Amino acid sequence: MSPSEGNAAVPGENSRGSATGPGTAARVDEWPRQARHMSQTIVSVAFGCLVLIGLVAMIAEGLAPGLILLCAIGSVALLAVQLLYFGRPGTAPHSPLSHWMLLAQLVLAYLPLVPAATALDNMLAFPAGTALLVLGKRAGPLVYVAVNASVAVIYTALGISPLLTVYETLANASMGLAVFLLTGLARTVSELHAARTELANGAVAEERLHFARELHDLLGQSLSAIALRGEFTRRLVRTAPARARDELAGILDLSRRALADVRSVASGYRELSLEQEFRAAESLLSEAEVDLRLELDERELPVQVRTVLTAVLRESIANILRHSDAGHCRIAVRQEADQVSLDVANDGTDPEESARDGETGGKGLADVTARVSALGGEITAGPEPGGRFQVRVRLPLDDPRPLPAARKAPRSEESASRVGVRLAGAGVAAVLVSFAAGAVLHVMVLTGAPWQITLTAVCLGALVALQLAFFSRPAARLPVRRAYALLFVQVCLVYLPLLELREVWVSFPGLLICNAHLLMRPAAAWFATAAVLASMAGVHAGFDSEISGIPFNVLATVNTGFVAFGVTWLSRLVAELDGVRRRLAGVAVAEERLRFARDLHDLLGLSLSAIALKTELTEKLLRADPGRADAELAEILTLSRQALADVRSVADGYRELSLESESRSAEAVLTAVDVRVRMEVQQEAAAALAVPVRTVLAVVLREGVTNMLRHSKVENCEIAVRQSGTTVCLEIVNDGVEDGEPASGGTADPETASGNGIANLSERVTTLGGELTAGLQRDGRFRLRAEVPAAA
């Protein structure tokens, strides 16, 4: 794989990448393989350049061909260990075998130094970099420093000048760090990919804990109070009917408030559609004769951001209609590089009331303010000049704060993130800065003129600063025109000093090769590479008296260029994959919140409705039939305890429901309110159904009965569960449909159905590959029908 081919895999600001992230999961799954190939390719290119430089030096020193061949064979063996062992994704870097392989690399790197001390000393970069990978935090840096210090010892022993000794030592240290980065970043990509779901799992666990606390505070106390008051009321039924009636009134009030809380929480946790809310706002404001101006950025937003903006918009429109006599309103949504904003402004407000509203807000504004703050955003609301009132929201698209659950992630995921961040940031900067420092030392070897050294240092500093600030920054997203403009600035910083420095010109032209492959298509990138290398050959052919200076400078440019490209490309891949992991976590949390809303509504809706109905019935029976009233109270206690258990099960996760139990419960509830029920449930067939099918049909039955009691004056009801071939069908038919009940002859539409119930049921049934229909029949009865594959 060529570098330019590899570049297409990483979204970025280049002409071929996507700025929004990976296109498909399959593409993300290819990233570890691409990272490994990129690492091995760049290491091979760097190795080849260093070996060729060494061979040229050995030939220039007049070493025997046989000796040169032996040194070349030893160097190839060194590369084989690096690629085939340390570059393999399954290698355990801290294992005893890895320690022995590192020792083999050290032997293969030091042996050629006996006949050719200064020709192949750059091979020491490979075991130096590998030591950082294999020996851990303490021993690794010590061995790395020791290997590079040995280069200084060798050059000092040979009587080479201190400046050149420092230059060669820094060159080896830079390449060692690059080898470590190239190998380590590729391994980090594999680790992050393997652990890409762990952050999501941790985030979901944290969300469950939060939801459990919220449910306990909101519903747990109400349900516990219902149970306690129910037990107390049972003792009063025969001895103090009047007090019992008061207690029943309290139970009824508690159950109704708990049911309202369930609907409120379920609605708050559902994903809201910003597009639908805009249409609703437009319709409402049009009916109120408010002139509306919309400025919408229609790019896709993360689920949580979209849901919070929808809640803010809904509350803002409600406040406009409730607290102002608006004639004009402006709604604007804009996306910038790292944030999205929503502005809602209207006229027709009382300045004093607007100031008071802006200071105190209301419950709705306080709620949305808390939700905005939870995502790391900010919201302001208050009067503006000209008698307008404005609500302004700013939300980050990528929250820089770590997810709370990330602290609870497994050690492997935590380690991968830590190493990834350090390698992608400080590591790339260290490699590029060390290359630039080597170039400054090189010019100091060539000349002692302060102005020439200063000019070189200033241009190199600006060159690397541009690189680190834009091209090699992992999260950089540059518009194409700006990127090419900055590349042109770098070209000037590389070549313009040549006019003054001439034969002592030293720069970092490898960065031009790096950025050409980051920005351009493959053909253009390779043409630019050839042009840079030709310019290097031409310049040094004109100024160098020794012919060996041409291949040295050309190969050094190839080496630094592709190493810079490799570490930049891999660091971007690490950052992008970390972003994918965080997006997965966000999606997982959003899906879990939707599950909370769905399960909370489905599991508790019927229980609380039944408690309310039975409480009303018990109140009527107190004087007429105390014995039956006592029995109804016993059922209320059972229902309240079951509801309390359901509260816990919603937060804990998936709950299996029994279709047989639900059918018996539905029959009992309907019979208790004097509904004639004809039940046709094949119990044996129902028990044999797959658990997901059984659970979904039980939920449909529960919600169907809840809606029947809530929205109709039902007298007769038919419930049937039948299996035919490979499908199983649940059908609920009832009379007593009130005027205005929405009818639907086809598939249930969540957008037109009232409440969350039908939308929840439709989503559950569709997930199993089934179909849900609900609507009025010609005979005036309402039918709810769910048909799903029996083996789903």
Image (cartoon, helix red, strand yellow):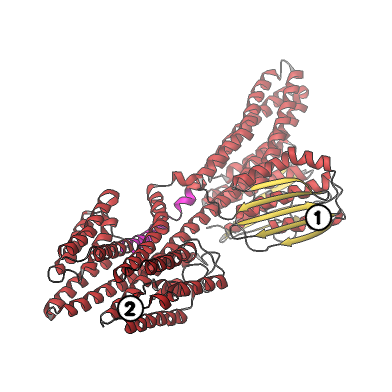
Between residue 87 and residue 681, name the one nearer to us: 87
Q: Is residue 760 visible?
A: no
Question: Tag 1: Cα neighbours inside 10 Å, few (<14), some, or many (≥20)?
Answer: many
Q: Is residue 228 above or below residue 600?
A: above
Q: Main secondary structure of the magenta part?
A: helix
For residue 257, what is the image quadrant? top right
Q: Mark 1–mark 2 contact, CB under 8 Å?
A: no
Between residue 103 and residue 249, name the one nearer to us: 103
The residue lying at 75 percent from left, 23 percent from top is 245
For residue 62, what is the image quadrant? bottom left
Q: Where residue 612 sits in the image (x, y, percent)?
A: 72, 34
**Residue to which mark 2 is pinned:** 554
User: Which of the two marks, 1 or 2, is nearer to us in this view?
Assistant: 2
The residue lying at 21 percent from left, 59 percent from top is 102
**Residue to which mark 1 is pinned:** 329
Q: Is residue 605 above or below residue 248?
A: below
Which range of residues does the magenta coloring cover?
Answer: 179-201
The answer to whether residue 737 is left or right of residue 73 is right
Indicate the amino acid at tag 1: Cys
Q: Where residue 429 sits in the image (x, y, percent)?
A: 40, 60
- Residue 114 got which mark? none
Q: Earlier in the sequence, mark 1 or mark 2?
A: 1
